[in-house]
Amino acid sequence: GPKFAIDAIAAGREGAVSLHRYVHPGQSLTLNRNLRDFYELNKNDIVLGIESFDKPGRQTVAHDPKKAKTMKNDRITFT
């Protein structure tokens, strides 16, 4: 799924950083590694009203009458 692709991209970037540090003299190969310090968000302290969200109108699907009785897709794309 998407997590697999994201993890693969992250691992590739980490490999690129390692190669860059290896070929440039004086670079530390261990500094700033594993910066995965995640802290749980305290959900009880969040104050967020429903009025703060945007409520844009949704587009309606339009149909092309010329393609109505053909085997082609008669829906018009959104803009």
Image: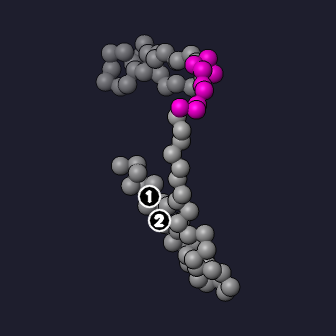
Q: Quote the CA–CA distance across marks 1 and 2.
A: 6 Å
Q: Which corner quadrant holds the C terminus? A: top right
Would you name the residue on which mark 1 appears? 7
Q: Position of residue 19 (x, y in %)?
A: 56, 78
Q: What are the residue bounds of the magenta stretch?
A: 44-52
Above or below, 10 against 76 in this view is: below
Circle 1 SS class:
helix
Query: Which label belongs to residue 11?
Result: 2
Q: Nearer the viewer, residue 53 or 12?
A: 53
Above or below, 42 against 1 in this view is: above
Q: Are the residues flagged by discs 1 and 2 in contact, CB closer than 8 Å?
A: yes
Q: Amino acid at mark 1?
A: Asp
Q: Nearer the viewer, residue 59 or 11?
A: 11
Can residue 39 be seen at all in this image of the molecule? yes
What residue is rendered at 58% in x and 32% in y?
45
Circle 2 SS class:
helix
Instruction: Answer few, some or many: residues within 10 Å of disc 2's Cα (few below 14, many 20 plus, some between 14 and 19).
Output: few
What residue is rendered at 59% in x and 82% in y?
22
Q: Nearer the viewer, residue 49 or 29?
A: 49
